[in-house]
Each structure stands twice: as C-alpha cells, then as structure tokens.
C-alpha cells in the first residue's frame, strides 16, 4: 500500500484542558448540564454535576 507510513513518537509533554462548554451560552451550558445529570452513567453524571457547579459559582476553571 503506497502512502501508508508507520512511525513512532515519544511524548515529552502532555497538556490538558478542562473545558465544560464555557464558550457556549449560559442557556446552552445549562441544557447540557441538565441532560448529563439525567444519565445513569456515573462518569457522565459527574461531568453534568461539575458543569452545574461551574454555572452556579460562576467560576471559570483554569485552561
């Protein structure tokens, strides 16, 4: 197969972003948080809870 090349790379730095739709309207964020809180998966529900807390406190999490 021409054009497919395998390669290996060493990771020297990893940066993370903690974003909970802060770039969306307050209404959209609230709707997303509400929908996630309805989910029975604990991880999904936890993200919804974090979004709700972020909305209620008005805190912007570090980027």
Image (tube, rainbow, N blue to C red):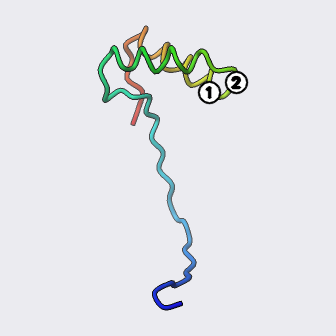
Q: Closest to the observer: 2 or 10?
A: 2
Quarter occupied by residue 63:
top left
Q: Closest to the observer: 33 or 57?
A: 33
Quarter occupied by residue 46:
top right
Q: Is residue 36 left or right of residue 27?
A: right
Q: Position of residue 32 (x, y in %)?
A: 46, 21
**Residue at the extreme front of the image, as rendered:** 1
Q: Is residue 25 left or right of residue 53?
A: left
**Residue at the extreme bottom of the image, as rendered:** 2
The dot on residue 44 is 1
Q: Which residue is located at x 51 percent, y 85 percent?
A: 5
Residue beneath disc 2: 42
Q: Position of residue 39 (x, y in %)?
A: 63, 20
Where 10 falls versus 14 (above or below)? below
Q: Is residue 11 left or right of residue 20?
A: right
Q: Which residue is located at x 69 percent, y 26 percent?
A: 41
Q: Which residue is located at x 49 percent, y 14 percent?
A: 52
Q: CA distance from mark 2 to mark 1?
A: 6 Å
Q: Residues within 10 Å of mark 1 (few under 14, many from 20)?
A: some
Quarter occupied by residue 62:
top left
Instruction: Tell me, yes or no, whether the two marked residues, 2 and 1, touch with CB atoms within 8 Å.
Output: yes
Q: Secondary structure at mark 2?
A: helix
**Residue at the extreme top of the image, as rendered:** 56
Where 46 falls versus 27 (above or below)? below
Q: Closest to the observer: 16 or 25?
A: 25
Q: Position of residue 36 (x, y in %)?
A: 56, 21
């Amino acid at each position: 197969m021409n054009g497919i090349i395998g390669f290996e790379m060493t990771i020297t730095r990893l940066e993370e972003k903690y974003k909970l739709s802060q770039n969306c309207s307050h209404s959209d964020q609230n709707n997303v948080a509400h929908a996630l809180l309805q989910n029975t998966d604990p991880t999904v529900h936890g993200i919804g809870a974090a979004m709700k807390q972020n909305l209620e406190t008005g805190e912007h999490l570090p980027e």
